Each structure stands twice: as structure tokens, then as C-alpha cells.
Image (cartoon, rainbow, N blue to C red):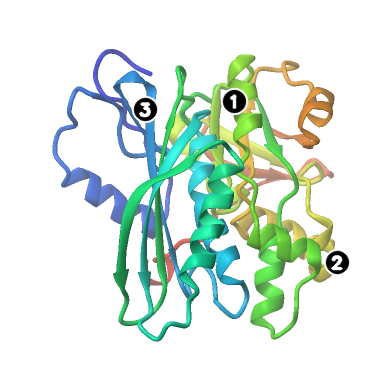
Amino acid sequence: MDGPGPTTVQLGPGAEFDRIRRAIAMGGALPTSVRVGPGDDAAVLEGGWVLSTDLSVEDVHFRRAWLSDREIGYRAAATALSDLAAMGASPVGAFVSVALPPDGSVNWDELQAGVVEALASVGAAVLGGDLAKSPGPLFVDVTVLGRTAWPVLRNGAEAGDEVWVTGCLGASAAAVRAWTEGNEPSAAARLAFARPIPRIAAACCLVEHKLVDALMDLSDGLAGDAAHMAAASEVKIVLQAGAIPVAQAAVDLFGQSEALQAALHGGEDYELLFVSGPGRVDPAYFMKRFNLELTHVGRVELGDGVWLEQPSGSVERLERGGFDHFGDLA
């Protein structure tokens, strides 16, 4: 982080993020106790405290026909915890605010049990929250609190770095496609959507061993999130199409070519995207310790934007990013 004052991180392109930029501009000067302000996956305060909030809205982020109440609670907490992983922070707890439909159709105890399960899986607890009645859809808002001695931002990528991701991409998008077409997704695709794994342990290990220069989670698709990292770091990121780890569940549904597009643009994988110096990362170590695949998917160069390199060697700029809540209003 730069100097004694608060650090702000530049956001990438998109109508959703244009609105966020305007909100940040109206927010006024940051207190000196803020070490990292808006623009990254979470804010960082003095003492290494890390905070982030994540909102799950029925019929936007999930549908109740797709998930049990317990899965809805689990998923809402897990996706919020992923923001702590994106900063290399260890979770402490969460504040959970829920607005329930008035007809009693949501089992509050089951939803809360899902939240508690996700938090307990990473050693965190419920610290408080709020409960209200919703006139319409179900809302679950989770504010997570964590701590780290060295928060890793998304603005540290430099030319010459390697680009890496954890896990496989596109399975969550495959589940959504199947459901919206009136079909039941495969077990693997459904699990990827309903029970994403916040990569806390792997992120903290990367930080502990000083293997990561820039870090974020993959919530909006590899192309979109790489664009945020490129913008924040003021660099060019080149992704190698043949190296991207596409989930078999996506290939089975889409075919290889469209599955790659799901991995690039589908979103909600909640894996990690990070950069490291050449030759520093040992994927075998992470597979042995965490049973987690790490894949070298590209490189950082001088320039700007996100580019896709085909196995043939041709390179094209990716103009399409990831999911944008307000993209249709741009």
C-alpha cells in the first residue's frame, strides 16, 4: 500500500462500475484510519481489519426454485467470504441482514443454518445483523470481517508476471443455463453454484509464502475480473485460451468452444485470480496441501486491457467483460 494515507484502487470498465465510481466520488474524503478505500474486493482499516459486504437478491443472484433455504444461506455467506480470500485475510465473523417474504415460505432456521455452516467452515461466527419483512423477494446481505497483516490488492500486477487461477471455471454458469432452460443441471454444476468454496486457506498460503503480487476473486468471469486487475495495475493481461481450466460440467453442457466463453464471461466461480513472479508458484504443492488445482493461464505485459491468445498464436482484445447488473442500461 502506498504511503501513510488511504489507498484507492481503480475500477475496470462497465455500467455497474460507472455507478460505483459516481458513488465513490460523492463519498467525501476517507478518514486516516482507512488504509484501503473503495475499489478493491474489501476495505482495510488500521490494524489490518478487513471488511466487505455482499448482497444476494432473489431472482437476481438465485431463484428459490433452484436452491433449498439452507443452500441460499450457505451461498450468500460463502460468496461474501470470498471477498476476504481476495484480500488474503483470515475471517473473524459476519453480520447477516435478511428481509423475508411475509408469506412464511422461507424457513428462517434453515437459511440461518446455511449461513452458520459456511462461516464455521472457515472458523468464523455470526456477530450480529438485522431481520426485516420484505414486501417481495428474499434479500440476504452479509458483511464479513477479517484480518490480515498484509492485504494483497489487485493493483500489484507488473509486466513479466505470470497470471494464475485456482480450480476450474464455468460450472456455475452451466448450472444457471440448465435451470433457465427448464432442465436440471449435473450434480457437479449444481454443487458449483449452490456451494461455492471461499478459497481462504489457499489465499492465506499464497500470502504467507509471499507468492502473490496482485489478487482478487472471480465473481464476474475471468475476462471481466482480469479487466479490473489490468485497470487497477495499469497493465495489459494476456490470457491463453488453451490454458484456461474449463470445468467438465460446462464442456458437457455447452461443448468446448462455448464452455470457454462461459469460463471467460459466465461468472460466479468464486475462484482466485492472482499474479506472481515467473517460476515462483509450485502447483504440485497446492494440490498436495489443499487438493486444489492451480493453473498458469497467461502473462502480464505493458499496455492495457485484456487480450486472448489462441493456440495458433493470434491475439485479440476481449471487449466483452463479465456480468454487469446495469449493462443493459449502458
At x 70% / y 34%, what residue is drawn?
298
Q: Amino acid at mark 1?
A: Cys
- In this view, the mark in front (2 or 3): 3
In this rendering, which labeled residue sits more in front, label 1 or label 2? 1
Q: Are marks 1 and 2 in contact (CB under 8 Å)?
A: no
CB-based contact (under 8 Å), mark 2 and mark 3? no
Question: In the visual, does 313 lie left or right of 276?
Answer: right
| Mark carried by residue 138 | none
Left or right, residue 268 beside residue 253: left
Q: Residue 284: x percent and y percent?
A: 84, 25
Is residue 7 found left or right of 247 in the rendered image? left
Q: Earlier in the sequence, mark 3 or mark 1?
A: 3
Q: CA distance from mark 1 to mark 2?
A: 33 Å
Query: In this view of the protein, which residue sits in the foreground, 174 or 137?
Result: 137
Q: Residue furthest front?
A: 109
Rendered-image quadrant of the C terminus: bottom left
For the residues marked 3 and 1, what is the alpha-carbon distance in whole angstroms?
A: 15 Å
Q: Amino acid at mark 3?
A: Trp
Among the two numbered marks 1 and 2 on one chain, the one whose residue lies closer to the N terminus: 1
Residue 40 is situated, as x and y percent measured from the top left of the image, at: 41, 37
Q: Which residue is labeled 3 in the image? A: 49
Q: Could you give the CA–CA distance between mark 2 and mark 3, rounded to whole angstroms?
A: 42 Å
N-terminal-most mark, 2 or 3: 3
The label number, if any, that marks residue 204 in the structure image = 1
Q: Position of residue 202 (x, y in %)?
A: 66, 30
Tell me, for residue 252, which label it has, or none: 2
The foreground one among 171 and 200 is 200
Residue that appears at 60% across and 64% down:
71
Residue 116 or residue 97, whichever sits in front = 116
Residue 203 picture quarter: top right
